Image (tube, rainbow, N blue to C red):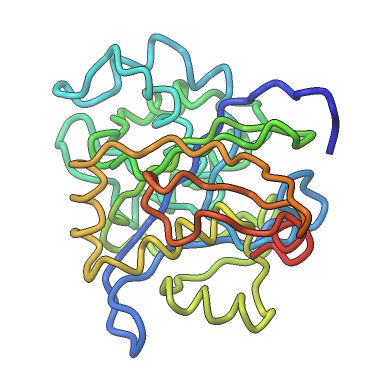
């Protein structure tokens, strides 16, 4: 923690969901385990995501979006970043063939995987890949799921938009082995149970947004809800009392927790 407020960095993350038939869950989400040397949420189970790059803001990307998508959408760089990050970290690409309008297939994805590392290292901008491969970013498949701003007392702060999308059929997902060292399709109830047992490390914003998935019976329900309801911006505040410090979450955000001990969040990541 620091007395000086750190600047906000734009970031995006994506919940890739699909239906399942598990005893405790009817949908599951793709999550990755962050490498222990990553400077944020190291070793934690998280959704694919990261900082918005300058290349994600390239105005030329507007020519590679669905015709009915809003070209002046202020969320466009965040949507682009979430698609790029899901490809880099999860090997799931929300894109279409511009000639046929069909989503990228598993077979096509095998060929496109050669771009994952150059994109991750910054050697290749996303625009160059989609232009070379005649692709369109399927930003219309994304629902705006949540919006969190890191508390002002934290040394690193992010303005993070969470998106949700149904995973394209036959795209199975795979971690990159660099930023993430493991991956899993997992039900939200399972995540919470395993985190409570200490088998998963789940940071507070991730836990809240995993828990919110529990209210939906199908992946389609979750996506439709996100597309129909604008998320409430959450910037947790700290309350200092004789009992200790507490992180306050606005009740309007709709999460189950509105007040949580800071030490529990920092020490146990749940």
**Image quarter of residue 185:** bottom left
Residue 3 coordinates in the image, percent (x, y): 85, 27
Who's the residue at 67% across and 44% down the image? 239
Q: Quadrant of the C terminus?
A: bottom right
89 vs 27: above or below: above
The image shows residue 260 at horizontal and vertical percentages of 62, 58
Most foreground residue, 242 or 9? 242
Residue at the location (34% across, 39% down)? 231
Farthest residue, direction bottom: 23
Which quadrant of the view contains residue 53?
Answer: top right
Tell me residue 102's x, y (percent).
18, 43
Quadrant of image for the N terminus: top right
Depth check: give the residue in front, 53 or 44. Answer: 44
Name the quadrant containing residue 32.
Answer: bottom right
Residue drawn at point x = 47 percent, y = 79 percent:
190
Q: At x 30% / y 18%, what residue is drawn?
A: 73
């Amino acid at each position: 923690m620091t007395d000086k407020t750190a600047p906000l960095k734009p970031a995006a993350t994506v919940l890739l969901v699909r239906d399942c038939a598990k005893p405790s869950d009817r949908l599951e989400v793709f999550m990755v385990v962050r490498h222990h040397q990553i400077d944020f949420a190291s070793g934690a189970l998280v959704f694919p995501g990261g900082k918005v790059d300058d290349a994600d803001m390239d105005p030329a990307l507007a020519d590679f979006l669905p015709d009915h998508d809003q070209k002046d959408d202020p969320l466009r760089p965040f949507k682009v970043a979430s698609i790029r990050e899901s490809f880099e970290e999860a090997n799931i690409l929300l894109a279409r063939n511009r000639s046929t309008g069909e989503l990228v297939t598993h077979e096509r994805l095998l060929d496109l995987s050669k771009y994952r590392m150059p994109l991750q290292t910054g050697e290749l901008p996303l625009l160059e890949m989609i232009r070379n491969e005649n692709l369109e970013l399927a930003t219309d498949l994304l629902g705006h799921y949540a919006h969190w701003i890191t508390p002002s007392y934290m040394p690193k702060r992010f303005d993070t938009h969470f998106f949700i999308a149904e995973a394209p059929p036959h795209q199975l997902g795979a971690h990159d082995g660099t930023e993430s060292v493991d991956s899993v399709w997992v039900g939200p109830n399972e995540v919470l149970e395993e985190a409570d047992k200490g088998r998963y490390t789940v940071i507070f914003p991730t836990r809240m947004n995993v828990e919110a998935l529990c209210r939906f019976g199908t992946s389609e329900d979750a996506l439709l809800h996100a597309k129909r309801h604008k998320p409430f911006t959450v910037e947790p505040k700290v309350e200092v009392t004789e009992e200790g410090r507490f992180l306050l979450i606005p009740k309007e955000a709709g999460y189950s927790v509105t007040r949580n001990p800071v030490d529990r969040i920092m020490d146990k990541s749940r």
